[in-house]
Image (cartoon, rainbow, N blue to C red):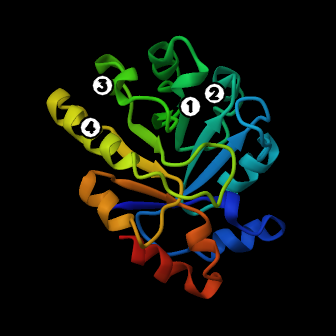
């Protein structure tokens, strides 16, 4: 079953614990944390104390997407925070394979992300065989509520083909402008994990579950 990852960037920040509790009992759900440093992208979000509180309060796995210039630092300083998946950007680092292998010592799942302008062939075969997730950004990283870029479909199909050719096992995750209007086409293209922020949280707490299910 497709994993749905509500992006907490779109939730009510003043009532995060209540927002987390609203998803209790929903299966195959991760909480997606967009962590930005104000340098790699022009925005600033969750710091270490908030990340640690969210992972402790959450009944679901926490999926952290690091839009930062120094993912090595965050990987080291957050290794005891309870993060399930640690995703970093290939554009932020010169030796992604080395970092991925180091992170695997501390995190159950390690992912790599590509911006809309970054080609799939930037990811080496060896890297794809040593990671657990590839995050395809279907908007420019940095802010929520942007429109979906259809170029993501071809990237997803290409990644699915390479996964088959390599006999690799990484998930294909998509983030940016995901809604019930494109979710099924994304799944058909090969996506296993859909990140959705605005679409889910604008429905109101009583409708979070139905919003999640509509994406499947």
Tag 1, which secondary structure?
Answer: strand
The CA span between labels 4 and 3 is 15 Å
Residue 121 x/y as whole percent:
34, 24
Q: Going from the N terminus, do you reach mark 4 or mark 2 first?
A: 2
Q: Is residue 106 visible?
A: no
Q: Nearer the viewer, residue 118 or 163?
A: 118
Q: Going from the N terminus, do you reach mark 3 or mark 2 first?
A: 2
In the rendered view of the protein, which quadrant contains the N terminus?
bottom left
Q: Is residue 22 visible?
A: yes
Residue, disc 3: 129
Residue, disc 2: 75
4 vs 3, front mark: 4
Query: Could you tell me which residue is drawn at 55 percent across and 37 percent down?
Result: 86
The CA span between labels 3 and 1 is 16 Å
Q: Nearer the viewer, residue 195 or 59?
A: 195
Q: Nearer the viewer, residue 117 or 161?
A: 117
Tag 2, which secondary structure?
Answer: helix
Marker disc for residue 158: 4
Q: Going from the N terminus, do you reach mark 3 or mark 1 first?
A: 1
């Amino acid at each position: 079953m497709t994993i749905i990852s509500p992006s907490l960037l779109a939730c009510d920040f003043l009532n995060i614990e209540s927002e987390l509790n609203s998803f209790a009992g929903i299966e195959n759900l991760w909480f997606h944390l967009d962590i930005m440093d104000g340098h790699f992208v022009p925005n600033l979000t969750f710091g270490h104390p908030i990340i640690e509180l969210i992972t402790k309060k959450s009944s679901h796995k926490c999926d952290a997407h690091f839009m930062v210039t120094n993912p090595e630092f965050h990987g080291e300083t957050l290794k005891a925070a309870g993060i399930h998946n640690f995703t970093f950007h290939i554009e932020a680092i010169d030796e992604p394979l080395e970092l991925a292998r180091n992170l695997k010592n501390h995190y159950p799942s390690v992912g790599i992300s590509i911006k809309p302008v970054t080609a799939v062939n930037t990811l080496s075969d060896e890297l794809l065989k040593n990671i657990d997730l590839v995050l395809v950004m279907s908007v420019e990283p940095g802010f929520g509520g942007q429109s979906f870029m259809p170029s993501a479909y071809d990237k997803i199909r290409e990644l699915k083909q390479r996964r088959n050719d390599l006999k690799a096992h990484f998930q294909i995750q998509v983030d940016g402008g995901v809604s019930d209007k494109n979710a099924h086409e994304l799944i058909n293209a090969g996506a296993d994990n859909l990140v959705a922020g605005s679409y889910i949280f604008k429905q109101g707490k009583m409708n979070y579950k139905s919003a999640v299910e509509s994406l499947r």
